[in-house]
Amino acid sequence: MMNTKFRCLTIGYIESRKGQDTSILAQDLKKNIVNLPAVQMLGTMDRNGIHSILETAELIIVPSREDPMPTVAAEAMMHSLPCIVSDAAGTARYLTEGRNGWVFEQGNVPELSQNSA
């Protein structure tokens, strides 16, 4: 079995409505992130920094519990990144399943895991 690494991003303020805890399966994101060596928390970035990491990524996950139109998903699409977004993100309507992204039911960790595999 080949061990393939790729860069997957979740960008946004850390708060419940953004759903980052769903994307890494952690209840207390800030506390438990140290136990996940494959996860890096980069901190606050300016627009140029965000565009720079978008250029080096292979996938973005937008696991929002509610977000009418997440800017980060639109920016990822500008960089031709496939997006995995929750159905609670307005961007979900602009994805073609399997072509430029996937949509999962908000909060459905097994479905998110299936799309990420």
Image: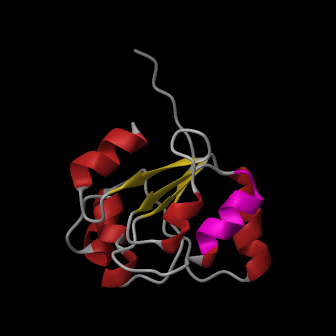
- Residue at (70% x, 71% y) in the render: 50
- Residue at (31% x, 45% y) in the render: 113
Q: Quadrant of the N terminus?
A: top left
- Residue at (28% x, 47% y) in the render: 111
Q: Which stretch appears magenta? A: 72-80
* Residue 22: image location, x then y, percent: 29, 64
Taking the image as shown, residue 108 lies to the left or right of residue 45, namely: left
Which of the 4 quarters of the picture holds residue 36?
bottom left
Q: How is the image coloured?
A: secondary structure
- Residue at (51% x, 78% y) in the render: 12
Relative depth, front residue between 55 and 71: 71
Which of the 4 quarters of the picture holds residue 63?
bottom left
What residue occupies the far top of the structure in this picture? 1
* Residue 41: image location, x then y, percent: 49, 69
Magenta highlight: main SS: helix
What residue occupies the far left of the structure in this picture? 27
What residue occupies the far right of the structure in this picture? 48
